[in-house]
């Protein structure tokens, strides 16, 4: 499936900005199942410097400096991406028993395994937590395939939690999400990651986009899509496999991947420092447009 993705971020300031230093994590990744045909990031006003640099996880960050006086700044990313089927529908049943997965991870020395071990430890937004471990512990009965456990955890979060955009902020701890049984995609991803890490499994945060299909007979609303988040689990025999607890499914052709990290803090779409400005307003508009009309019409029928 091919998509044209537009992601516009607009800051409007109360007062003039003299200097603005920014870091963006907005460029989609090239992966075995995802081909980036084009991707362009533009900034208005024109920055005095702009360059890209990969991080430890292979995400492509964009750094830029705007040093002209301005009361508004726009960052616009336009990408064309082809997402292929991953063929992982049977992965949960084919994965290693969770006990064997942990044993193998402890002894393997390959680059992917070493990186996975770094994602066994807690982070600020997805910590090791005994109460969160208890939330998931009964799922992982002896001999259960690791990815089947991740699939069941995905379903539990989907079934027991309410999607509520007004409940959490970026500062809401994941244990508050567990207690209230409410949150958004970012919160559900952090909860799953925290639960898995608390049980000893490597898990990472994935940011990206999800094609949203309008109700039958209704047109697509341009700019109404949004950034999305899910999680990934490492099985030594199959590698990283993704799960989306917000929608109770395994990501495939409708999910476009931008970045991987320990948690949201590693992959914030845009953040920076500035001189001046006072109060500011933020507007974000995202549009994920399918380019395969036959597939799109079939999905919307």
Image (cartoon, grey):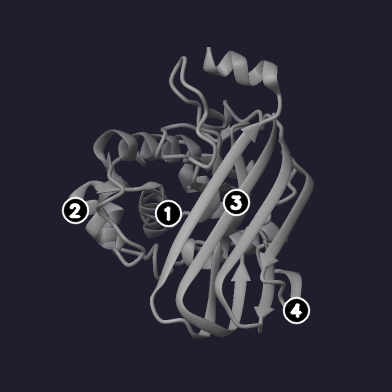
The answer for how far apart the CA atoms under marks 2 and 1 are is: 16 Å
Residue 32 in the image, given as x and y percentages of width and height: 75, 42
The answer for how far apart the CA atoms under marks 3 and 1 are is: 26 Å
Residue highlighted by disc 1: 193
**Marks 2, 1: nearer the viewer:** 2
Rendered position, 237 above or below 198: above
Residue 147 in the image, given as x and y percentages of width and height: 49, 38
Residue 256 in the image, given as x and y percentages of width and height: 62, 42
| Along the viewing direction, whichever of 42 and 72 lies nearer the viewer | 72
* Crowding near the residue tagged with mark 3, few <14, some 14–19, many ≥20 C-alpha atoms within 10 Å: many
Residue depicted at x 50% and y 26%: 213
| Along the viewing direction, whichever of 289 and 177 lies nearer the viewer | 289
Mark seen at residue 7: 3
**Marks 1, 4: nearer the viewer:** 4
Q: Secondary structure at mark 3?
A: strand
| Along the viewing direction, whichever of 33 and 136 lies nearer the viewer | 33
Q: Secondary structure at mark 1?
A: helix
Q: Is residue 233 among what the camera can see?
A: no
Q: Residue furthest left?
A: 180
Mark seen at residue 49: 4
CB under 8 Å between discs 4 and 3? no
Residue depicted at x 32% and y 67%: 171
Left or right of residue 151: residue 184: left
Residue highlighted by disc 2: 179
């Amino acid at each position: 499936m091919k998509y044209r993705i537009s992601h516009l971020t607009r800051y409007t300031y109360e007062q003039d900005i003299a200097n603005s230093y920014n870091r963006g994590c907005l460029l989609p990744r090239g992966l075995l199942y995802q081909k980036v045909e084009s991707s362009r990031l533009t900034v208005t006003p024109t920055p005095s410097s702009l360059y890209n640099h990969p991080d430890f996880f292979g995400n492509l960050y964009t750094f830029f400096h705007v040093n002209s006086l301005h009361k508004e700044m726009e960052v616009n990313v336009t990408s064309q991406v082809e997402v292929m089927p991953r063929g992982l529908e049977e992965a949960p049943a084919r994965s290693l028993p969770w006990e064997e997965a942990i044993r193998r991870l402890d002894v393997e020395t390959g680059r992917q395994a070493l990186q996975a071990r770094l994602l066994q430890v807690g982070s600020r937004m997805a910590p090791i937590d005994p109460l969160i471990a208890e939330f998931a512990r009964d799922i992982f009965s002896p001999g259960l395939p690791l990815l089947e456990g991740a699939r069941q955890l995905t379903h539990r979060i989907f079934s027991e939690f309410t999607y509520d955009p007004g409940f959490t902020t970026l500062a809401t701890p994941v244990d508050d999400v567990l207690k209230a049984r409410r949150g958004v995609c970012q919160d559900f991803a952090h909860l799953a990651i925290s639960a898995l890490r608390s049980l000893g499994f490597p898990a990472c945060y994935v940011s990206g986009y999800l094609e949203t299909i309008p109700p039958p007979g209704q047109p697509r609303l341009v700019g109404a899509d949004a950034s999305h988040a899910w999680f990934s689990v490492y099985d030594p025999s199959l590698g990283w496999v993704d799960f989306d607890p917000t929608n109770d499914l395994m990501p495939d052709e409708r999910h476009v991947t931008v970045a991987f990290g320990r948690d949201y803090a590693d992959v914030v779409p845009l953040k920076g420092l500035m001189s001046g400005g006072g109060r500011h307003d933020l507007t974000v508009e995202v549009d994920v447009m399918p380019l395969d009309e036959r597939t799109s019409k079939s999905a919307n029928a």
